Image (cartoon, helix red, strand yellow):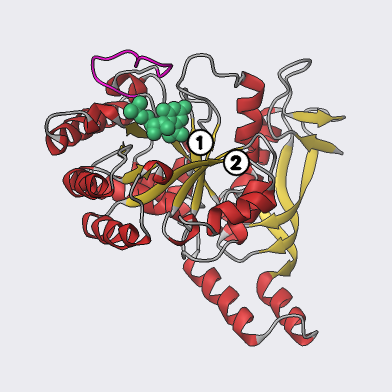
């Protein structure tokens, strides 16, 4: 029996495959669930690299989203004990689920069939060399897929940090920068004259200019408290912000409660794995654990807030990088800036967060357009370098 690690140990043997085997052995792969088949294919790649042959896999549950066909094309026969349609039928017969749920699952399976060509391509390249249009097809979080589409069609990777303290100024900023951004990031609790009536016009502007509303709440508490902070109180964040930020520091509770919340059809979370400010206490081990947590919630996590290309082989995840400004290296407190070109080309940024570089400019629309263009040119240069 051999076992594949999720990642190579950074000490000792550094092997991906552990166990007793010799070159030329045959190996039957055993998996619990098959969705796209990509994880089995990655296992096969690691086994093949050790000289182990694989052509068969047994899975407990086939989710019937095209994974078995994809693997067949890649030389792997899949044998499943159950498929999701049968499982739903058994559950219905036992009275555990109703017809409505069965139909909902069936509709979901119909609309989430994998795109085999896009998947094959994404598996052969790291995310830095794939286009956003290609990555849209493999994103598992629906807001990530939506963002990739917006980015590709509007040709922008700019997220505006709309850190203003006046409701009218916030709406004006959204209107001015709207045509040039893919997301508008708020700190809604800094708006002096916040009123629930601010949300409807903000949503209207977001819809008209096709960008996503993103509340940078940086949730960090026990799950029960976050559940309340997310849905209750004055801001009712879960009712309007498709995206929020969160810390992984207190564990998975934050993702469990956001996943369960009701309100919007699509929602996503950016987990903060590295910070832009000087003096941050975040270290490499913490960043890595945050990434691991993100990868355990592929349907919910949109991406990672970080300052370096700390993940490459997960093209559905988005790297969000703040601390971006032209010409200025730092503010008068602790913020540190990099240029828009360098964050995209050297640091792996997919979406750049720009605040004061735009909000303090004489003409916010002109500044937003300028950042948009520099960032987009850098992205084109990055994917061409392949
Ligand atoms: O461009 P600025 O410095 O005016 O604004 C940067 C924005 C602010 C910060 O709260 C946020 O980006 N930010 C974050 C985020 C997005 O989570 C993380 C971080 O490490 N640094 C940072 O500045 O709204």
Q: Residue at x 41, y 59 (%)?
A: 240
Query: Does the residue tagged 1 have its C-beta within 8 Å of any atom of ligand 1?
Result: no
Q: Which mark is residue 55?
A: none
Relative vertical location of residue 84 with respect to residue 354 in this rendering, above or below: below
Residue 235, horizontal then vertical, whole percent:
45, 55
Quadrant in which the C terminus is drawn: top left
Give the labeled residue for mark 1. Answer: 304
Quadrant containing ligand 1: top left
Q: Which residues are magenta?
A: 324-335
Q: Residue at x 29, y 24 (%)?
A: 340
Q: Which secondary structure class fits the magenta region best? A: loop
Mark 1 secondary-structure assignment: strand
Q: Is residue 251 visible from the viewing direction of this image?
A: yes
Q: Which mark is residue 294?
A: 2
Q: Residue at x 43, y 44 (%)?
A: 189
Mark with earlier residue (1, 2): 2
Residue 61, horizontal then vertical, whole percent:
72, 63
Crowding around mark 2 (Cα neighbors within 10 Å: few <14, some 14 to 19, many 20+) is: many
Q: Are marks 1 and 2 in contact (CB under 8 Å)?
A: yes
Q: Is residue 321 visible from the viewing direction of this image?
A: no
């Amino acid at each position: 029996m051999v076992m594949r690690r999720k990642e190579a140990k950074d000490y000792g043997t550094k092997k991906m495959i552990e166990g007793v085997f010799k070159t030329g052995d045959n190996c039957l792969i055993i998996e619990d669930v098959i969705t796209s088949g990509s994880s089995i294919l990655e296992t096969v790649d690691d086994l093949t690299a050790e000289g182990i042959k694989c052509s068969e896999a047994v899975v407990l549950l086939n989710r019937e989203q095209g994974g078995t066909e994809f693997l067949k094309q890649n030389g792997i026969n899949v044998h499943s004990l159950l498929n999701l349609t049968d499982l739903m039928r058994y559950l219905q017969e036992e009275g555990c689920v109703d017809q409505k749920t069965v139909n909902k699952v069936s509709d979901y399976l119909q609309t989430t069939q994998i795109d085999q060509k896009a998947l094959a391509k994404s598996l052969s390249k790291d995310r830095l060399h794939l286009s956003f249009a290609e990555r849209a097809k493999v994103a598992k979080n629906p807001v990530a897929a939506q963002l990739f589409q917006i980015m590709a069609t509007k040709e922008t990777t700019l997220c505006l940090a709309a850190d203003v303290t006046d409701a009218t100024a916030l709406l004006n900023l959204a209107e001015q920068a709207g045509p040039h951004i893919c997301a508008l990031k708020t700190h809604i609790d800094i708006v002096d004259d916040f009123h629930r009536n601010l949300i409807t016009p903000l949503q209207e502007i977001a819809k008209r200019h096709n960008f996503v509303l993103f509340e940078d709440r940086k949730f960090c508490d026990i799950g029960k408290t976050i559940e309340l902070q997310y849905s209750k109180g004055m801001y009712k964040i879960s009712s309007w912000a498709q995206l929020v930020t969160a810390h992984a520091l207190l564990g998975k509770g934050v993702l469990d409660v956001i996943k369960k919340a009701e309100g919007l059809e699509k929602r996503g979370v950016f987990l903060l794995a590295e910070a832009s400010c000087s003096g941050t206490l975040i270290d490499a081990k913490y960043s890595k654990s945050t990434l691991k947590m993100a990868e355990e919630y592929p349907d919910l996590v949109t991406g990672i807030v970080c300052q370096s290309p700390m993940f490459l082989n997960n093209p559905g995840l988005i790297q969000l990088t703040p601390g971006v400004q032209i010409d200025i290296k730092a503010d008068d407190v602790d913020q540190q800036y990099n240029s828009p070109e360098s964050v995209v080309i050297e640091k792996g940024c997919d979406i750049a967060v720009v605040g004061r570089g735009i909000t303090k400019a004489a003409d916010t629309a002109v500044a937003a357009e300028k950042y948009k263009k520099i960032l987009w040119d850098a992205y084109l240069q990055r994917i061409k370098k392949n």
